């Protein structure tokens, strides 16, 4: 796993201390080990995990400066991209949110303590915490959770004005962006740019949305309503 990650970081143009690379590998190995008894990822090959989980998460280092920022990772799953970003940028103030409690318990009770990492953990659906943490974060990230028009309603309410929502997408990013144009405007966002990286032989695109106005108070709606009638 380590040589694959080192090679990928070199291609990406990201320099990290060797100790940090070792800690990233330790986290990747912990995910694969826990995956034997808990459904964390469909990826079981160490080299693929290094590229498709660790390196993919670290592409965000090339998108925005994150030092000292507050970051919410919505639908973090096994901790991606939030945990690798925290390992790479220790001053990042990280909050992880996921609806599956057993994954969150593993991250909170085992994975992050083993790495001596601190984070806030929110266990539940994204729309359930929006009132409490509304417009509190510099950056919100999300990877492989939902189509962009739906995802914007879950994530943009958490971003303060001037902050960013970074949506990690694949080959359909352009199509999803067109579909989400109304939602982005309605929720107080403004599309800024996309950044595309080749990871594991495929294009991985980060959609960069800047928060330019307050999100109207009626959003986010209940998830059933979001799916039934997308913006």
Image (cartoon, rainbow, N blue to C red):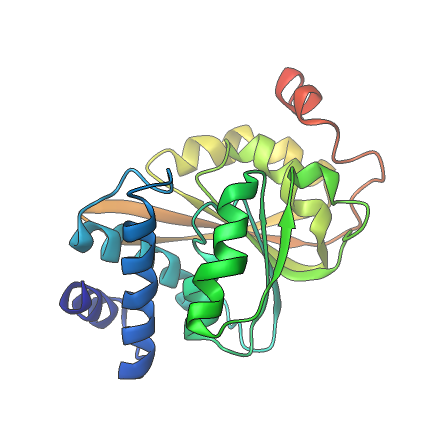
The quarter of the picture where residue 24 lies is: bottom left
Residue at 49%, 37% (x, y): give it: 145
Percent position of residue 113, x then y: 49, 68
Residue located 68% across and 60% down the image: 137
Instruction: Please identify the residue farthest to the top as the structure is shown.
Output: 228
Q: Is residue 89 above or below residue 125?
A: below
Q: Position of residue 29 (x, y in %)?
A: 27, 59
Residue beneath the point at 62% across and 39% down: 152
- The answer to which of 19 and 57 lies nearer the viewer is 19
195 relative to 118, above or below: above
Residue 173 figure quarter: top left
Q: Relative to residue 102, is residue 198 depicted above or below? A: below
Q: Quadrant of residue 139?
A: bottom right
Work out which quarter of the rendered image holds the N terminus and state it.
bottom left
Number of on-image labels: 0
Name the spot of residue 149 as percent of width and height, x first: 58, 32
Identify the residue at image location x=71%, y=51%.
158
Q: Nearer the viewer, residue 83 or 225?
A: 83
**Residue 166 seen in render:** no
């Amino acid at each position: 796993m380590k040589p694959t990650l080192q090679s990928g970081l070199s291609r990406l143009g990201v320099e990290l201390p060797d100790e940090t690379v070792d800690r990233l590998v330790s986290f990747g190995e912990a995910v694969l080990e826990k995956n034997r008894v808990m459904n964390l990822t469909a990826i079981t090959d160490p080299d693929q995990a290094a590229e498709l989980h660790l390196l993919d998460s670290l592409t965000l280092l090339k998108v925005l400066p994150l030092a000292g920022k507050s970051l919410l990772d919505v639908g973090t799953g096994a901790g991606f991209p939030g945990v690798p970003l925290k390992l790479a940028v220790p001053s990042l103030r990280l909050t992880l949110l996921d609806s599956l409690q057993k994954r969150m318990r593993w991250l909170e009770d085992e994975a992050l303590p083993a790495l001596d990492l601190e984070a806030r953990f929110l266990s539940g659906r994204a729309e359930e915490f929006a009132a409490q943490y509304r417009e509190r974060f510099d950056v919100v990230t999300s990877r492989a959770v939902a189509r962009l028009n739906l995802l914007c309603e879950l994530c943009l309410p958490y971003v303060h004005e001037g902050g960013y929502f970074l949506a990690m997408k694949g080959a359909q990013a352009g199509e999803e962006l067109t579909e989400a144009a109304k939602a982005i405007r309605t929720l107080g966002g403004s599309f800024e740019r996309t950044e595309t990286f080749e990871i594991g032989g495929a294009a991985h695109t980060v959609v960069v949305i800047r928060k330019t106005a307050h999100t109207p108070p009626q959003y986010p709606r209940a998830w059933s309503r979001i799916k039934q009638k997308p913006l």
